[in-house]
Image (spheres, helix red, strand yellow):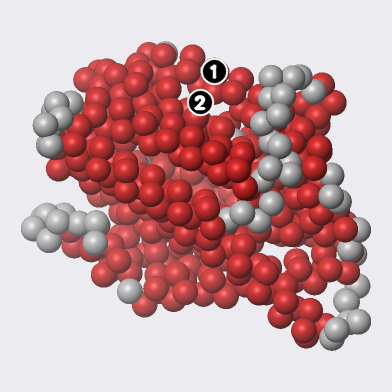
């Protein structure tokens, strides 16, 4: 087999895994948008409350998913080695750890109102957001288990079911929201509480469907056999891999939160432009998240087969595919900034021209931002496939905070570049993370070209 043929095969396998994963991430994004739009139609205060409460829930879910993501390379490697018992043990202990994290989340959500007040949020909005989390917060327990099953099924290359289930969940969430928020079809009008019930119900249904699928379609791995049985060795291994992933995610979430605070110092209009531009960037980023997960799976499989040449070829193929996917949103950000931003704005809003002007400049920076972000998340996926999580955690902490946040402040304020300078600081941080992590990966796997 020639190198060219090999790269084509790698590209085909990457796309076969990636497209369903990317679709499932976009469908999950649709769930968030549906909640936002429907509550925006219902009541502005309810919208503010679900934005506040939903942000806390989503950020906790991301940070708390470290143990779920740790299972992915472990399962991929074990499956490539034909070790069904190890697949089961890794999945089971990831579920145990994720359940414990979920209990921490429930405790945090029960104290949400004092936390929001401490952060300077308005009393009424804080109370409503806390009321939302008292119901929706229970959904964190099934949501974290869903993350574990998604990692396991992805590593076993059962990715199409994730797309189908997530699309179905988005539809169910929309229907239940419509019924319970507004009181349609004979349901009570519950407003914000209805959205909370819909969220918890959707997460529970997703868990039930994925668990049933895993039990039926992956019988050879018997994922839920003796699920109550402790496994100290694998528990420690999943914990060791998972907590650095959680802290890495926390560093990135913290960077974006801090940048949002900085943008607020420029005023409401700048903050609104930042929020829209960030939503567009986040939507494009979901594609790269899917490719990062494929990187973790493919590297884990290659290690399980002890195929170093295939690992290097696969990594190069992933870089080219990720760059190809990145070109499309970058071109749109540069060529169509105002039409994209206008999708989020009322044509009659008097501040619309100002938001469009600021947002257009931010999207120009987002073109650089997206390439840097794609590079760092792909590098993270490659390193996680090698079960290397602690060094990337330290690299991320340095790149995101002293470098990224420091550059954002200096460029935005002392150098007077405003919001554009703050976003350039994000580029600095993400590019530094990408450079550090990619260098570590290629040093680990060898830099020599593969030609045979």
In terms of depth relative to the viewer, which is nearer, 193 or 269?
Answer: 193
Residue 403 pos. (x, y %): 63, 47
Residue at (56, 32) in percent of width and height = 145
Q: Could you tell me which quadrant the C terminus lies in?
A: bottom right
**Is residue 356 visible from the viewing direction of this image?**
yes
Image vertical order of residue 368 relative to residue 30, above or below: below
Image vertical order of residue 352 relative to residue 313, above or below: above
Q: Earlier in the sequence, mark 2 or mark 1?
A: 1
User: To which quarter of the image does residue 48 belong?
Assistant: top left
Q: Is 327 on the left-hand or right-hand side of 264?
A: right
Point out which mark residue 326 bears: none
Residue at (63, 51) in percent of width and height = 154
Q: Which residue is mark 2?
A: 141
Whether label 2 touches label 1, CB < 8 Å: yes
- Looking at the rendered structure, the secondary structure element under dot 1 is helix
Query: Alpha carbon of mark 2 to alpha carbon of mark 1: how far?
Result: 7 Å
Q: Is 207 on the left-hand or right-hand side of 396?
A: left
Residue 71 pos. (x, y %): 71, 40
User: To which quarter of the image does residue 351 belong?
Assistant: bottom left
Residue at (80, 23) in percent of width and height = 231
- Looking at the rendered structure, the secondary structure element under dot 2 is helix
Q: Residues within 10 Å of mark 2 (few under 14, many from 20)?
A: many
Residue 363 pos. (x, y %): 39, 64
Point out which mark residue 103 bears: 1
Q: Residues within 10 Å of mark 1 (few under 14, many from 20)?
A: some
**Is residue 433 visible from the viewing direction of this image?**
no
Residue 12 pos. (x, y %): 66, 74
């Amino acid at each position: 087999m020639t190198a060219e043929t090999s790269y084509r095969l790698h590209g085909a396998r990457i796309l076969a895994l990636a497209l369903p994963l990317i679709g499932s991430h976009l469908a999950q994004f649709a769930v968030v948008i549906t909640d936002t739009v429907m509550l925006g139609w219902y009541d502005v205060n309810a919208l503010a409350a679900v934005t506040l409460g939903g942000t806390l829930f989503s950020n906790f879910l991301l940070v708390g998913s470290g143990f779920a993501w740790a299972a992915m390379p472990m399962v991929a490697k074990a499956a490539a080695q034909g070790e069904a018992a190890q697949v089961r043990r890794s999945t089971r202990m990831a579920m145990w750890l994720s359940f414990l994290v979920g209990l921490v989340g429930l405790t945090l959500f029960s104290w949400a109102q004092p936390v929001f007040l401490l952060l300077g949020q308005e009393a009424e909005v804080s109370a409503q957001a806390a009321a939302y989390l008292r119901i929706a917060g229970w959904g964190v327990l099934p949501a974290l288990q869903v993350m574990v099953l998604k990692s396991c099924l992805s590593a076993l290359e059962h990715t199409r079911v994730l797309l189908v289930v997530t699309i179905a969940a988005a539809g169910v969430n929309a229907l239940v929201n419509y019924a319970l928020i507004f009181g349609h079809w004979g349901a009570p009008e519950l407003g914000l509480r209805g959205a909370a019930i819909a969220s918890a119900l959707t997460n529970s249904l997703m868990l039930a469907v994925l668990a049933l699928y895993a039990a039926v379609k992956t019988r050879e791995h018997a994922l839920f056999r003796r699920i109550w049985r402790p496994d100290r060795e694998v528990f420690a291994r999943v914990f060791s891999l998972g907590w650095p992933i959680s802290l890495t995610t926390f560093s990135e979430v913290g960077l974006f939160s801090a940048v949002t605070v900085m943008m607020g110092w420029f005023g409401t209009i700048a903050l609104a432009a930042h929020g829209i531009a960030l939503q567009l960037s986040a939507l494009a980023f979901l594609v790269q998240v899917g490719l990062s997960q494929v990187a973790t799976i493919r590297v884990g499989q290659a290690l399980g087969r002890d195929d170093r040449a295939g690992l290097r070829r696969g990594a190069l193929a992933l870089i080219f595919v990720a760059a190809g996917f990145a070109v499309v949103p970058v071109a749109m950000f540069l060529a169509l900034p105002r039409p994209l931003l206008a999708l989020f704005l009322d044509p009659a809003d008097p501040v619309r021209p100002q938001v469009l002007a600021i947002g257009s400049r931010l999207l120009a920076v987002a073109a650089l931002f997206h390439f840097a972000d794609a590079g760092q998340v792909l590098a993270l996926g490659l390193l996680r496939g090698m079960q290397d999580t602690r060094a990337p955690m330290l690299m991320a902490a340095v790149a995101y905070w002293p470098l990224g946040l420091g550059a954002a402040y200096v460029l935005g304020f002392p150098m007077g570049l405003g919001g554009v300078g703050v976003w350039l600081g994000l580029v600095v941080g993400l590019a530094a993370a990408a450079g550090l992590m990619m260098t570590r990966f290629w040093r680990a796997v060898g830099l020599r070209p593969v030609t045979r």
